[in-house]
Image: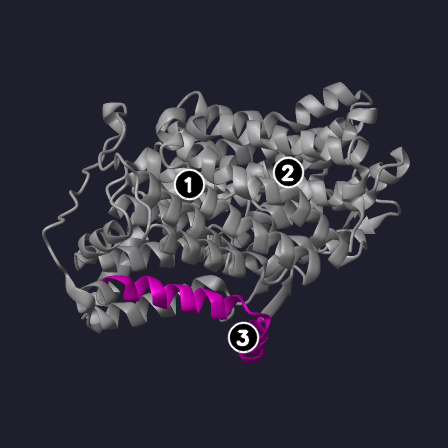
């Protein structure tokens, strides 16, 4: 048994600086020095291992096992999702279906702002609600590229859009995990997260279009933006406060897509924006021209959309607990990581009483979301006219295309797992927890930091949920409020976590430009997280009635 120590140098400032070294190396290499993502990830992993072993005293074998466990988790489920989404995209692209897809979306609106709103926000929220784990960014970024958005815009805007739905992603998994790790009531947590995120579900669509074209051109299309946001926010609030976490995003996303499409049948901007805004030359992509004179007909439009409808159906089915349980019943293996499982002990003040860390790799290949996506891709390929040999050839080409991305994602998750089992991530959280009356703001930023480090709102909730409850109770603040704030603040960190950025760069075939994407989204991530923090401060001290839970 090895027990974690959160101040190994007896000086919290120095311990925090050392704990942050892997983050500085990783993000600095990507964002400042333009190092390729897989090289930066290897550098970050090496730094994390050195900090864990030399600074925190973690046994070398345990540190290596933690890295291997994290790398395996990076490949399944995350890498498995990315590989198969890109496989489907490659199949559809080679058959030229995106030209028809583009014209069909143009039939809803030929305005680039509204196309972005429909795909990145409304449709992306559906995939977040049904699957999570990088699926929405991979799908929407690929679709935006097919519509002629530049790689930078397709990547960065997909990341910005994938924020407000994250806390209820994968059928509510982050909030369910938060309840399990904190011992707090699931329905009270769900209601509080819904209250915190409802205003941001209205704000984010406006923020998305502002980030795309600026304030003036955003105001030109404010009515449909408001429709998309409100039609998402109202169901999100009602379902989270009166039902539970499971169907929040799925129902809200369907509502948003339907209301936006119907509204655009009776309203169109006075000055449609059919061209892309000016960008640096290196970010340009060929922009397809909407062929208004071409009438594809119902059959062609149905054929173009069929692969994505099949994908949505399979992703939703694979996200339901009943289907997952059935598939796990056919075959699933839970493999304890011998030498790590139950041998690392978390201690106070991160937990009230010492607790051992589990390390069990869930080898659930059949029920993994990526497998559902693979089946959807194969079925779609057969529908589009591919034979067995053609599918195999395209899959091999896709595997070669994403090889560095898979390596990067594996290394990123390895970093997150090493810092988690070494306790260095808890050191960073404790540094923010020691902020007294400002804790509601900085506690929210702990959630943001947790997602930025781990790449997952679920992982951040598991990592810092207990700390949030303990600190809140010590300060006399609502534990429900601060545990929920961990998840709500965390959603804004999703756009800057390295795994999501690599997913976006892979989906847009812009691998090697992760630094540009990080710089594009960093301000938006930090600003939105700060706004969530200010809202939580208001809930704690100004609007205490918002703490009443049904």
Assess disc 2: are there few (<14), some (14-19) or many (≥20) residues with their C-alpha within 10 Å of its C-alpha.
many
Q: Of helix, strand and loop, which one carries label 3? A: helix
Comes first in the chain, label 2 or label 3? 3
Comes first in the chain, label 1 or label 3? 1
Disc 1 and disc 3: Cα gap in Å? 39 Å
Which residue was labeled with disc 2?
A: 489
Name the disc covering residue 223, or none. Answer: 1
Q: Of helix, strand and loop, which one carries label 1? A: helix
Q: Position of residue 401 (x, y in %)?
A: 29, 48
The number of numbered discs placed on residues in the rendered structure image is 3
Chain part drawn in magenta: 304-332
Choose mark 1 or mark 2, whichever is in front: 1
Quadrant in the picture for the C terminus: bottom right
Q: Position of residue 81 (x, y in %)?
A: 43, 57
Mark 2 in CB contact with mark 3 (< 8 angstroms): no
Left or right: where does residue 32 sit relative to residue 18? left
Q: Position of residue 219 (x, y in %)?
A: 40, 31
Q: Position of residue 241 (x, y in %)?
A: 69, 56
Left or right: where does residue 39 sit relative to residue 49? left
Q: Of helix, strand and loop, which one carries label 2? A: helix
Judge whether residue 223 is colored magenta: no
Residue for point 39% across, 31% down: 218
Disc 2 and disc 3: Cα gap in Å? 31 Å
Question: Residue 436 falls in which quadrant of the image?
Answer: top right
Residue for point 42% across, 58% down: 258
The answer to whether residue 324 is above or below residue 123 is: below
Choose mark 2 or mark 3, whichever is in front: 2
Name the disc covering residue 171, or none. Answer: none
Which residue was labeled with disc 3?
A: 323
Is residue 545 in view from this perspective? yes
């Amino acid at each position: 048994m090895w027990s974690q120590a959160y101040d190994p140098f007896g000086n919290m400032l120095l311990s925090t600086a050392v704990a942050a070294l892997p983050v500085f190396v990783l993000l600095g290499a990507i964002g400042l020095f333009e190092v390729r993502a897989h090289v930066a990830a290897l550098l970050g992993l090496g730094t994390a291992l050195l900090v864990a072993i030399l600074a925190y005293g973690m046994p070398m074998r345990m540190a290596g096992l933690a890295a291997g466990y994290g790398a395996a988790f990076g490949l399944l489920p995350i890498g498995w999702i990315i590989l198969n989404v890109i496989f489907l995209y490659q199949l559809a692209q080679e058959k030229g279906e995106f030209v028809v897809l583009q014209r069909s979306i143009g039939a809803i609106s030929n305005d680039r702002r509204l196309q972005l709103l429909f795909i990145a926000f409304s449709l992306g929220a559906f995939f977040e609600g049904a699957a999570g784990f990088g699926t929405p960014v991979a799908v929407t970024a690929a679709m935006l590229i097919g519509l002629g958005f530049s790689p930078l815009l397709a990547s960065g805007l997909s990341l910005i859009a994938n924020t407000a739905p994250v806390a209820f992603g994968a059928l509510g998994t982050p909030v369910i995990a938060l309840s399990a790790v904190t011992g707090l009531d699931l329905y009270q947590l769900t209601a509080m997260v819904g209250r915190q995120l409802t205003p941001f579900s209205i704000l984010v669509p406006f923020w998305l279009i502002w980030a795309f074209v600026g304030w003036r051109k955003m105001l030109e299309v404010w009515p449909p933006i408001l429709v998309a946001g409100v039609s998402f926010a109202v169901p999100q609030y009602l379902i989270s406060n009166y039902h539970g976490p499971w169907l929040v995003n799925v129902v809200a996303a369907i509502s948003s897509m339907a209301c936006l499409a119907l509204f655009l049948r009776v309203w169109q901007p006075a000055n449609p924006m059919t061209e892309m805004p000016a960008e640096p030359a290196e970010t340009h992509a060929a922009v397809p021209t909407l062929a208004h004179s071409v009438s594809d007909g119902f059959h062609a439009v149905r054929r173009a959309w069929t692969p994505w409808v099949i994908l949505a159906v399979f992703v939703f089915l694979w996200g339901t607990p009943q289907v997952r349980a059935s598939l796990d019943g056919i075959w699933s293996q839970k493999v304890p990581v011998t030498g790590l499982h139950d041998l690392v002990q978390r201690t106070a003040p991160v937990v009230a009483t010492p607790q051992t860390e589990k390390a069990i790799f869930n080898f659930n290949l059949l029920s993994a979301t990526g497998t559902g996506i693979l089946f959807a891709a194969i079925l779609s390929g057969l529908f589009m006219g591919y034979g067995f040999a053609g599918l195999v050839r395209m899959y091999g080409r896709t595997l070669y295309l994403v090889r560095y991305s898979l390596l990067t994602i594996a290394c990123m998750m390895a970093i997150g797992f090493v810092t988690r089992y070494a306790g260095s991530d808890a050191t960073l959280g404790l540094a923010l927890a020691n902020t007294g009356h400002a804790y509601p703001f900085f506690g929210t930023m702990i959630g943001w930091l947790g997602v930025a480090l781990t790449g997952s709102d679920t992982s951040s909730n598991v990592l810092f949920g207990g700390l949030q409850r303990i600190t809140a109770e010590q300060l006399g603040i609502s534990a429900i409020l601060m545990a929920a704030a961990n998840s709500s603040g965390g959603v804004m960190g999703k756009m800057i976590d390295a795994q999501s950025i690599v997913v976006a760069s892979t989906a847009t075939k812009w691998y090697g430009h992760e630094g540009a994407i990080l710089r594009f989204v960093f301000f938006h991530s930090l600003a939105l997280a700060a706004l969530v923090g200010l809202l939580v401060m208001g809930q704690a001290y100004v609007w205490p009635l918002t703490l009443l839970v049904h």
